[in-house]
Amino acid sequence: MAKISPVSIKYMIHASFKAEGPLEKPDVIGAIFGQTEGLLGSELEMRELQKEGKIGRIEVDLEIIDGKSIGNVQVPSALDKSETTIIAAALETIDRVGPTEAQITVTKIEDVRGSKRDYIIERAKALLGGLDGSGDFGEMSKNIKEDARAARIQEYGAEKVPAGDLSGNEIIVVEGRADVVNLLKNRVNNVVGMNGTKLPAEIARLGETKELTLFIDGDRGGKLIAKNVIHNAKIVYVAVAPDGKEVEELTGKEILIALRRRIPVSEYTRREGRFDSYSEPEQEEKKEFEGDIKTAVKDVYEKIKGSKNAVLVDASFDVIRKVSAREVSKSLRGARAGVFAVIIDGPALTPIIKAAEEAGVQFLAATNFSTDEETSVKLISL
């Protein structure tokens, strides 16, 4: 009897069965061939299909519990989609296996070629890394190229910040790794990320020999980052993402437009009008909230309850940034100014509490806390 080649398999029929008495595997296989014989005509005769290699080896797993048999059946098929579904439906007509009543139910029909497609895409990404050339091969080709470009990300300096190609004279400075990845995907290679909002010393030193453009998010958090970076490095230009958008979510077109609209740092500081009075965040005096802090926190929490998000607020309880609860540590990492309180719709684990402490946050509110260490941050349970 011919065996189907694994290469030829298109679909796998998965079915479960139960029988009123004890059975063995040959009983089930015999019932499949015997009770479908003549049911679908000569073209879909199970025995003939298996001889021709269009139906593969039928696998049966069964166990006997309290005198009854239950198990699963797998039928590999090299037929087309419609023919495979007909075979699957025919299995459900089997009402007896061996000497006992039985019932077979098809649970799913799996397209086994999906895993092959995944392999093709992953392998193509690896091959493209060592191949120069161009071509338009549709969406698959586009995704492969983008992922291959993003894979060129490297670590720079002792602090191992994410970066692209820093060999040129012009360097774009962004907040984090996700921003770097997005720029690389969109062919902007001369980029380096800070891994947070505090400027690493390596990037500050780059400004002594390179022309730095700071590319910030289009929200209040982006402005706070600009205050810190501009006063700690030689920044030549500032580019700003569209209002309310983050650099990591911009399209290629939006990135290019924002970079074309970059302005000299002197013009940016003049427009913002707050930089002359800037002092290092470590030296800033902690602000006190005028009012009932717990009431203010719970008012904010009611607006995000059920969303699994978090809100960073200043001392006036104006929202600085709204992020996913999973992104709180990243958003706080290295932040030294402006964030007065953090309200999370979810738990605050030790990494979040440490990041809040390092950022000078005074209050951290969450549904529950998980830490064994003392902290200077005041914790509020929601």
Image: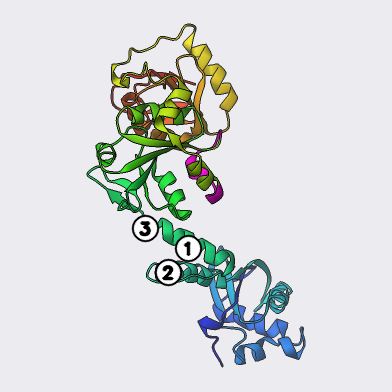
| Residue 129 shown left or right of residue 303 in the figure | left
Q: Which mark is residue 152?
A: 3
Q: Earlier in the sequence, mark 1 or mark 2?
A: 2
In the image, is residue 36 above or below residue 266?
below
Q: Which of the two labelled residues, at mark 3 and mark 2, occupies the earlier sequence position?
A: 2
The residue carrying mark 2 is 128
Q: Is residue 175 visible?
A: no
Which secondary structure, mark 2? helix
Q: Hey, what amino acid is under mark 3?
A: Arg
User: Tag 3: Cα neighbours inside 10 Å, few (<14), some, or many (≥20)?
Assistant: some
For the residues labelled 3 and 2, the Cα–Cα distance comes to 12 Å
Q: How many numbered marks have been drawn onto this rendered protein structure?
A: 3
Quarter of the image with the N terminus in it: bottom right
Classify mark 3: helix, strand or loop: loop
Callouts 1 and 2 close, C-beta under 8 Å: yes
Q: Is residue 260 or residue 278 the one in the foreground?
A: 260
Relative to 249, say whether 112 is above or below. below
Q: Quadrant of residue 10?
A: bottom right
